[in-house]
Image (spheres, rainbow, N blue to C red):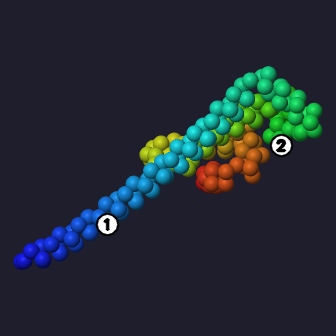
Amino acid sequence: MNWDAIGALGEVLGSIAVFLTLGYLAVQVRNAREQVRHSISQNSTGGNRDLFLARAMDERLIGLNVRANTALGGTPTAFETTLIEQVGLTPEEAAAMYWEQMAWWQQRLQIIPYLEQRSKDERAGFDFAVRRIYGGTPVSRLWYECNKATLRPDAVHYVDTLLAQ
């Protein structure tokens, strides 16, 4: 073998190494981009959950919100109306229940898109809880049915599929 052949072989191997490195970097960039999307989604959903729960737990804020909405011609949601008419809750209590249920939905919304990354047992436990909550707990079921048209379609599809099983 002469030096020209060895040089050519070295160039071929070098080119292959460059392509492998570029492929590896492309995969790493894609994974990093996915992690950033996941982090943004988690932070946004977690922030919403915290705000909704804070609203549900603050009697003064709920009272102000209900009073202002009523004065401006707003009406309670279908969920709130049902709780007021059938259960006898005050508008403030019904609003607090609405926001508490919304906070729980936001918590579950943090998990649903990433279930494939969880263990089989974790997923089974989550699925069991979702079936029990939205299929067996009357308040949660009512909230879900009244609001699912406004919720994220992918999450609604997941819950509906679980409930149909």
Q: Is residue 92 above or below residue 131?
A: above
Q: Is residue 156 above or below residue 76?
A: below
Q: Residue at x 93, y 33 (%)?
A: 71
The image shows residue 14 at horizontal and vertical percentages of: 23, 67
Q: Residue at x 31, y 60 (%)?
A: 21
Circle on res. 46: none
User: Which residue carries the number 2 mark?
Assistant: 78
Residue 127 seen: no
The image shows residue 115 at horizontal and vertical percentages of: 51, 48
Between discs 2 and 1, the one toward the N terminus = 1
Image quadrant containing the N terminus: bottom left
The image shows residue 60 at horizontal and vertical percentages of: 79, 22
Q: Secondary structure at mark 1?
A: helix
Which one is closest to the eye, mark 2 or mark 1? 1
- Relative placement, left or right, of 67 versus 3 is right
Image quadrant containing the C terminus: bottom right
Seen as rendered, the residue at the extreme left is 1
Q: What amino acid is labelled 1 in the image?
A: Phe
Kindly report the distance in space between the C-alpha atoms of the residues bearing marks 2 and 1.
59 Å
Q: Residue at x 74, y 50 (%)?
A: 150
Q: Residues within 10 Å of mark 2 (few under 14, many from 20)?
A: some
- Relative placement, left or right, of 145 versus 120 is right
Q: What amino acid is labelled 2 in the image?
A: Ala
Q: Secondary structure at mark 2?
A: helix
Q: Residues within 10 Å of mark 1 (few under 14, many from 20)?
A: few
- Relative placement, left or right, of 127 versus 3 is right
User: Which residue carries the number 1 mark?
Assistant: 19
Picture quadrant of residue 15: bottom left
Seen as rendered, the residue at the extreme top is 60
The mark tally for this picture is: 2
The image shows residue 125 at horizontal and vertical percentages of: 51, 41
Q: Nearer the viewer, residue 79 or 153?
A: 153
